[in-house]
């Protein structure tokens, strides 16, 4: 009987629903938003998603404020601050999940400087070309820059080709043709999927 009760006790965590596990955020946590299935989100996933892994199309930084937790990030509205509650509501409205990642020690020492740096970067427009410049940012570019002084994340050649087919999605072809540019394949940059896989980060859980 004791053996049966012990076995049942060991099985309980596996039987609990995922939403029963609360995730408490901390300053410096990174919030990765799962990718959608159309438009820009699908194009990002097509080029940078990894088979069998959760795909992301956005990343943001958690910071404390006198009114509570806020999120510092760069999206289509530019680089901005947003209450965490509003950020969560936006994700829920799009039926997306938010996955919390946390820096491993000793990289956590960079958080204070990173948050301060992020605040100086607010107010810039969104970088729709994803070609690095000092006048506009995109989401993972914004995060990489906030930690750049501490060399936490590395720039790498950007990829716009589907890893299975080697083809560039028509979304990217049309986007850059409209800008009068070639697709910037191989130029330095970042993306949320590669950033989430960085060894400096630990996956904490889903923010419900």
Image: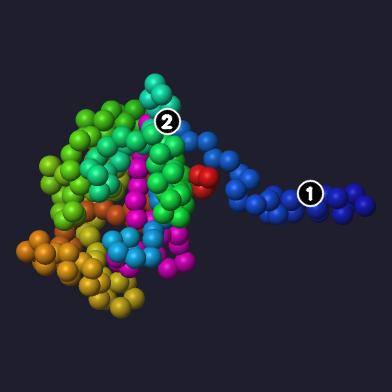
Residue 183 in which image quadrant: bottom left
Q: Is residue 69 above or below residue 172?
A: above
- Report whether residue 28 is seen: no
Q: Nearer the viewer, residue 185 or 46?
A: 46
Circle 1 residue = 9
Q: Assess whether residue 55 is covered by the magenta stretch.
A: yes
Q: What kind of element bears circle 1?
A: helix
Name the residue rendered at 29%, 54% in the picture.
191
Q: Is residue 119 above or below residue 185?
A: above
Q: Assess whether residue 149 is covered by the magenta stretch.
A: no
Distance from the alpha carbon under mark 1 to that under mark 2: 36 Å
Q: Relative to 72, is 32 on the left or the right?
A: right
Q: Is residue 80 above or below residue 161?
A: above
Name the residue rendered at 39%, 34% in the picture.
83
What crowding class fits label 1: few (fewer than 14 Cα within 10 Å), some (14-19), or many (20 or more)? few
- Residue 67, image x, y percentages: 41, 24
The numbered dot on residue 160 is none
Name the residue rendered at 34%, 55% in the picture.
57
* Name of the residue lying farthest toward the bottom: 165
What crowding class fits label 2: few (fewer than 14 Cα within 10 Å), some (14-19), or many (20 or more)? some
Q: Is residue 30 above or below residue 66?
A: below
Circle 2 residue = 69
- Residue 197, image x, y percentages: 40, 54
Name the residue rendered at 22%, 30% in the picture.
120
Residue 40 in which image quadrant: bottom left
- Residue 25, image x, y percentages: 48, 36
From which residue to which does the magenta span run? 43-63
- Report whether residue 122 is seen: yes
Q: Nearer the viewer, residue 118 or 75?
A: 75
């Amino acid at each position: 009987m004791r053996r049966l009760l012990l076995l049942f006790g060991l099985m309980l965590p596996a039987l609990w629903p995922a939403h029963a596990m609360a995730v408490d955020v901390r300053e410096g946590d990174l919030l990765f938003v799962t990718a959608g299935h159309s438009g820009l989100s699908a194009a990002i996933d097509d080029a940078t998603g990894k088979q069998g892994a959760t795909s992301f199309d956005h990343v943001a930084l958690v910071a404390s404020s006198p009114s509570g937790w806020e999120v510092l990030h760069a999206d289509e509205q530019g680089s901005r601050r947003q209450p965490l509650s509003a950020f969560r509501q936006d994700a829920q409205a799009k039926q997306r999940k938010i996955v919390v990642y946390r820096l491993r020690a000793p990289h956590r020492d960079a958080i204070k400087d990173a948050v301060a740096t992020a605040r100086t970067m607010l107010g810039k427009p969104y970088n729709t070309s994803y070609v690095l410049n000092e006048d506009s940012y995109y989401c993972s570019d914004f995060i990489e820059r906030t930690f750049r002084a501490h060399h936490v994340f590395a720039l790498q050649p950007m990829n716009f080709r589907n890893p299975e087919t080697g083809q560039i999605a028509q979304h990217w072809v049309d986007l850059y043709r409209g800008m009068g540019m070639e697709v910037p394949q191989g130029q330095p940059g970042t993306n949320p999927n590669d950033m989430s896989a960085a060894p400096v980060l630990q996956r904490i859980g889903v923010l419900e």
